[in-house]
Amino acid sequence: MKNIIIILIASVLLYSDGQAYDTNYSLHGSRASFLMMDSKWMTLNYLHPNANKNGMRNAAKANGDTHIYLYTRNAGDNGGGFNLGQINPQADWEAHLDILNAAGLKPVLWLTPDDSRSITKQSMAAQQAHFSEMVHRFDSKVTGYVACLECDEYWSPVQVQNLVAHLKTKTDKPVGVHLTSGLGGHKGNTAYYANADYVFLQLGWNKTPAQVAAMVKQAIAVTGKPVVASEYAIESRTAAARALGNAACQAGAIGTGNGRSITPCGYEAPPKEANFLKKYETELLGIAGVSVAIAAVYFYNKRFEEMPVDFTLKGTEDYQAYGVSFKKVNLTYDTEDSIMFYYRGTF
């Protein structure tokens, strides 16, 4: 059975990274301005039917934004002087997300609001159902997700961990967690971030650039996760807000949520190897399964105690070859411009 185990190990090595997000959708370098209180705007409420969508888009682009934060539901978090506190998924949201992407604003969906007890007191099964439906409908049109805004106001660390884990079974886009002000929120509990890909750090108001830098550095050191400085100014278009965002980036943050003026901020290049494996995941899983089946039948019929097995993986950026061979049996898989599968051998 040793040789079958070898093949199984090879398969596991190829597919053991199911919980990692696809870095093609990395939030490194992200730039948003979700609070624009001078205009009584909070982009989280952009999907409300009465939101000034043109105004928000134009203001975000004028402030240099690359991403935009959006609620998928709301039951009380108004974030301004207009009555935009009630949001439920609508049939036209796909079209609105298309408009944002065409404008160069990549949507980041925030799946749970604060100040919305009628939502947050629902069962965990209901929360999971909402998460699943949002991924089902919108995953191809968004860059990432934040499980909840100020999660520590209404859920325990274990509840958040479980919801993030559930979400990551539905999507390979990055998932963040946002708490009240400070590392670990008002409870100082960093267990909330355990399953997240990103820490969306609320820094609080009236901080100096030096204080922002110190908080970002602490969050990176303690959590070991990339940090988005997501909340530090109520008006993202001011020089003061941009200075705070700049300080966060210079301290190691990989993105900002309330404006900045500098461009470099945590760029992350997608690995080509991960892209290839993701593209041909189904085919490679099939090869692994067939390899194990052939090995099992061969061992059963021939009762070999030892059999040399050769598993190969080689190639360049444009050409890859994968193979499993033992005795008279060869299984080979080639990919260049098209997918081809070869088997030859005797039993």
Image (tube, rainbow, N blue to C red):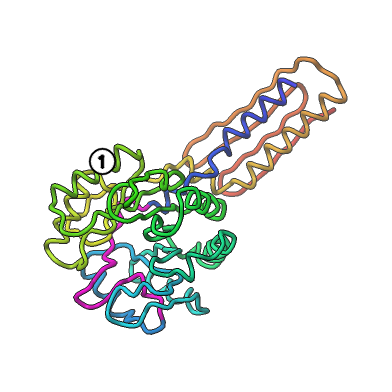
Q: Residues within 10 Å of mark 1 (few under 14, many from 20)?
A: some
**Kind of residue at badge 1:** Gln
| Above/below status of 298 relative to 333 | above
The extreme right residue here reads 301
| Above/below status of 240 relative to 273 | below
Toward the viewer: 225 or 337? 225
Toward the viewer: 227 or 329? 227
Q: Say what secondary structure mark 1 lies in.
A: helix
Give the image quarter of residue 115: bottom left
- Locate residue 96, reporting x and y percent: 42, 76
Give the image quarter of residue 341: top right
The residue lying at 22 percent from left, 78 percent from top is: 39
Q: Quadrant of the C terminus?
A: top right
Residue tagged 1: 218
Magenta region, residue range: 27-48
The extreme bottom residue here reads 50
